[in-house]
Every structure is written in structure tokens, then in C-alpha cells.
């Protein structure tokens, strides 16, 4: 799992949505913020309880001005759980059901990571320059 200091802020405009069975006829739809994402895994935070070894079918959704970028049907395996206040951070490794991952899914995940990198870069530039606006030379 990522270092605790790196998990202070959720990734901008990115959520994981998934459905969990709760009993025989009841399902619960969950939306969780993501705190880390790479090509093999993600870290999400929710108040729901899962155990290492549980599998999740995730839809990763990046909110965009016109059309959201969605990577639907990402299989994930919970590998680690860490309690944080009344929530839990979960490390989720992406698993492929096939010998070859779906090209469209890996393309969408790659696009989400690229846009995420650009958003984080813009955010860091804004926060770095915003403090200098009030200063005069």
C-alpha cells in the first residue's frame, strides 16, 4: 500500500463504482474515491468492510466536462486493508480473467492515467503559483 502521507488527498475527479451483494436478493451500489492508480492496481477508500482475497468488479469513472472517461468491468482483488478513522483504505490489484487483457479496457485505463497526470500537474502548478500572486517585488 502507498505510504500514509501520500494518501491524504483523493485523486481529482476519479471514482470507483461497484456493486456488492448483501444477502440473497439485495445488492448495494458503492462509490469510493481513489487515492492511487497505476496500470496494475489502485487504492480506494470506503466505510464498507472487505477482506483481503475478496474480488470486486469496478467501474472507474473520471468526471470530464463533456464525456466522462469510463473503464467498466475492471476485475480487482483486495490485497490489503488499512483502517483510517471510520473508513478503510483498500489496495486492489487488477486481475485479468483472460490470458490477454481486453485492449479497449487497458486503453481506457491508460487514458484515465494520462488525463489524471495532466490534472495533477495543473493542480500542482496552480497551488504553487497562487501563493505568489499576493506578493509584490
Image (cartoon, grey):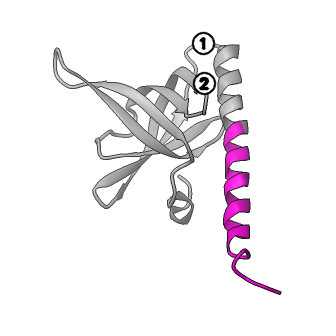
Q: Is residue 101 visible?
A: no
Q: Say which label, 1 or 2, has the lower sequence index.
A: 2
Q: Is residue 131 left or right of residue 13?
A: right
Q: Quadrant of residue 51?
A: top left
Residue assigned mark 2 = 67
Q: Quadrant of residue 115?
A: top right
Where does the C terminus fall, quadrant-wise? bottom right
- SS class, disc 1: loop
At 30% from the left and 46% from the top, the residue drawn is 47
Magenta-drawn stretch contains 50: no
Q: Which residues are magenta?
A: 115-137
Residue assigned mark 1 = 98
Q: Give 75 or 67, whichever is nearer the viewer.
A: 67
At 58% from the left and 27% from the top, the residue drawn is 68
Look at the picture and state if 36 lies above or below 103.
below
Q: Is residue 56 left or right of residue 128?
A: left
Q: CA distance from mark 1 to mark 2?
A: 29 Å
Magenta segment, principal secondary structure?
helix
Q: Give 33 or 53, whichever is nearer the viewer.
A: 33
Residue at the extreme right? 137
Q: Position of residue 1 (x, y in %)?
A: 53, 52
Amino acid at each position: 500500500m502507498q505510504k500514509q502521507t501520500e494518501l491524504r488527498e483523493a485523486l481529482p475527479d476519479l471514482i470507483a463504482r461497484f456493486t456488492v451483494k448483501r444477502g440473497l436478493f439485495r445488492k448495494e451500489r458503492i462509490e469510493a474515491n481513489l487515492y492511487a492508480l497505476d496500470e496494475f492496481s489502485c487504492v480506494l477508500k470506503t466505510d464498507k468492510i472487505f477482506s483481503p482475497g475478496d474480488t470486486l468488479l469496478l467501474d472507474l469513472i473520471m468526471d470530464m466536462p463533456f464525456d466522462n472517461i469510463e473503464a467498466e468491468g475492471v476485475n480487482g482483488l483486495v490485497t490489503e486493508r488499512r483502517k483510517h478513522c471510520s473508513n478503510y483504505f483498500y489496495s486492489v490489484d487488477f486481475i485479468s480473467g483472460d490470458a490477454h487483457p481486453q485492449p479497449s479496457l487497458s486503453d481506457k485505463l491508460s487514458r484515465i492515467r494520462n488525463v489524471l497526470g495532466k490534472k495533477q500537474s495543473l493542480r500542482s502548478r496552480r497551488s504553487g503559483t497562487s501563493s505568489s500572486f499576493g506578493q509584490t517585488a
